[in-house]
Image (spheres, rainbow, N blue to C red):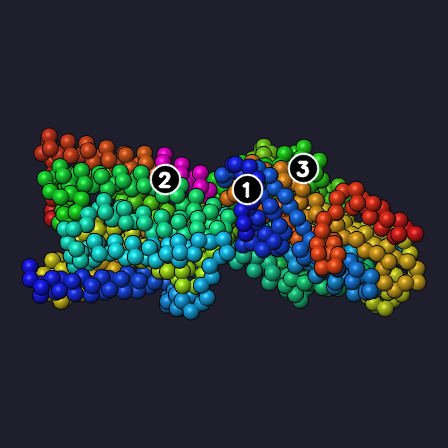
Amino acid sequence: MDFLQISQTAMMVIIGTIALALFGIFFGLVYKGIDRKLSAHMQGRIGPPIRQPFRDVVKLFTKENIVPENAIPWIFNLAPLVGLVATISILLYLPLGGFQPLFPGKGDLILILYLLIIPSLAMVIGGFSSGSPYATIGAQREMATMIAYEFPLAIIIITIAWRLSMQGVTNVFALSSIAATPVWNIAGPLGFIGFIILLLVLVIITPAELSKIPFDSPEAETEIAGGLLTEYSGRNLAMFYLTDGVKTVVMASLIVALFFPYNLSPLFGLESYPAFAVDIAFYLAKVFLVILFSVTLIRVAVARLKIDQIVYTYWVPLTLLSLVGLICIMWDQTIMANFGLQPVFEMLGIV
Amino acid sequence: MKTKQTTKTTYHIPIGPIHPALKEPVAFEFEIDGERIVDVDVSLGHVHRTVEWTATKRNPIQILYLAERICGICSYCHPTAFALAVENIANIEVPERAEYLRVIQAELERICSHILWAGVAAHEIGFDSVLFLTWQIREKVLDLTEYLTGNRITKGIITIGGVRRDITKEHHPKIFETLNYLKDNFEKLRKVYLDDKTFRMRAQGCGILTKEDALKLCAVGPTARGSGVKKDVRVDQAYFSCADLDIECITPDVLTGEVNGDVYDRIIVRLLEVKQAIDLIEQCIDKMPAGDIVSEPKVAKVLATLKKASGEGIGRMEAPRGEVIHYVKLVEGEEYPFTWKVRAPTYNNIMPWVPMLIGEQIADIPIVAASTDPCMSCTNRVAIVDSGKKYELNKEELHRLSVEKTRRLMA
């Protein structure tokens, strides 16, 4: 590889990363605005305008950044940055609309799972280092929540990967292979039910991953006054705010990539730029629907749970549910293999 | 705030005086083991506004409006209890129609207060949709209050010897419209508060106050009734026209058949009391006799009568949060009362916080603290400040000072 090629690749990576970061931040805030507006209407309020999150961020960046006396300043200031960077870096590995990921074939689901933990860990570290009792309690709760939801999340990912490996797909954890072989296309009737169960569990995991009601006890406003974020202000708080927005897009994109990797352009026979435009619009619509069901609708419909109730919810009902999904999919595979059953989509003649 | 390490496993967190869970300033110091509350200390005195002292520079009619401002939510009960005490001293007969009108206003206030509380309780457990739902319903009741009294919150309806505005036939359509609206929405509220899964998860078995503790610590109002203590001034010592009405103490066993004394039971009591209040207003409108609404409409004459009156009087009534007691002492020839003492219901409901909170989780603090419907500005009577510094009194010292003050008043 000569110098020209290396510099070209480097330029592409840098420009691509900046573009993706801007994309994630912009749509993270747009979706946040839509979420706030929609939930306001559901609660009989008018709600803020959709551009409100942008104003919030601008305002926060202009405000003073207060570091408490008890805090460990360098960790306290580093944590928000680490969180934001880690969240944006997940975007580099996710297929967005018709575009391949910026690093195709490099990262896989396991890497994304680890990267998803980092923003939460950054908040935990930031909370512990801020020296406030509220933040300490919030950090403890955040850790307990993480431990709770990781288990069903792992089951879902592994089930999908296992099912794909049974299909003879190599490199099962790569998102490109999941996009090439959507799970619904290969599932028989029982597997279809299994995947619906797994999707449901993943939708319920999302609010915990994003610290939204009913799983927002790490930040519970009325209990511990914002928990992890109690001591954060100004620039640092704005960065956590952005992290939250980007993470919402990331989680929704992950669900889209795992369960709905379809594109509209092949259907219309489009190519090149029209295809990109249609696919990206379709992708944004899918992300919106996922956010609507997993964040907005859930958070207006229930009360906040206590930390022991959160852990119980994930470890017992949801883990059992995802295991049921796993078993359904395993049986489905056996039944299909032994009785020569066709996948549902082929029976219906869709694919 | 620095965490104070007392032993290896427990730590302290301060909640308040200013905290999102608390609508008014009160300070808790919790000793926490993990997420469990081991011990709690409550300290008051953050919103002392010298209302009682101010009253000794006002005449009784002026005090009515001062008393309204003791509390934003019980803005009817306080002036009414004061009026009761003064009427008690001067032997002022209240016309029968006015007594019914007073009950209607009291029950309207109870509906507003309980629905407001329900919204706050929902907000405390992060259920904001219900907060907005309940406050939408409350808005209708406030509209009715404004229609009947001219004001939404500080109503200025009560006067010594009666009330200031009548409820006539023209008012009836709007009243019944609002009451029917409430009845239609009652089922919705009942479903949300009593059947919703997450609400039950947060409210059932949390913040338990046993009947023994409720009796021992003199809890009042829905807090006591939620623990199965049948205590209600409207029933025990009927004032106004309460004796003519069909009132029963509401305890949670009316609905569920058992008393647990938890937050859920207090929700049941308050919800049923909203229903009871609607029923009482209808009964009052139905039974209300014709006649005057005030014994002496000329304020100057009332004041002249009161100036001649001498003695002590007690006014007791069932505020939305429980029993409120006003003690007034008038001296002949004096325009202003010699002393005025207010005992708001929250005062009694502070100590029950301790058994309720111990053993619960941090997450339960907001809902348990809110479950007694505390009103701090009603309660704060004393703030001891010595050269700019606050300090606390111990029991003996406080007792000695109280005895001294009583002697001074009696002299």
Q: CA distance from mark 1 to mark 2?
A: 29 Å
B41 falls in the magenta region: no
Q: Which residues are magenta?
A: A304-317
Tell me the chain of label 2: A
Whether residue A46 is visible, yes or no, is no
Residue closest to the eye, B195 or B244: B195
The residue sitting at 27% across, 34% down in the picture is A324
Q: Amino acid at mark 1?
A: Gln
The residue at 81%/59% (across/down) is B161
Q: Are marks 3 and 2 on the same chain?
A: no
Q: CA distance from mark 3 to mark 2?
A: 38 Å
Q: Which mark is residue B214?
A: 3
Labelled disc at residue A148 = 2
Quarter-of-image position of residue B261: top right
Residue type at mark 2: give it: Ala
Q: Which is in the foreground here, disc 3 or disc 2?
A: 2
Q: Position of residue A69 (x, y in %)?
A: 50, 56
Instruction: Name the residue located 11 percent from the left edge and 42 percent from the top edge.
Output: A169
Q: CA distance from mark 1 to mark 3?
A: 33 Å
A6 relative position to A92: left or right: left
Chain letter, disc 3 residue: B
Can you give x and y, in whole percent of width and height, for residue B165 in the image?
A: 73, 64
On whether disc 1 and disc 3 are found on a single subunit, the reply is: yes
- Read off the residue under disc 1: B5
- Rendered position, B261 above or below B143: above
> What is the secondary structure assignment of the residue under circle 2?
helix
Q: Quadrant of residue A166?
A: top left
Q: Which class describes the residues within 10 Å of circle 2: few (<14), some (14-19), or many (20+)?
A: many
Q: Quadrant of residue A21?
A: bottom left
* Horizontal relation, residue B380 to residue B91: left or right: left
* Mark 1 element type: loop
* Residue A264 horizontal/vertical position (percent): 16, 58
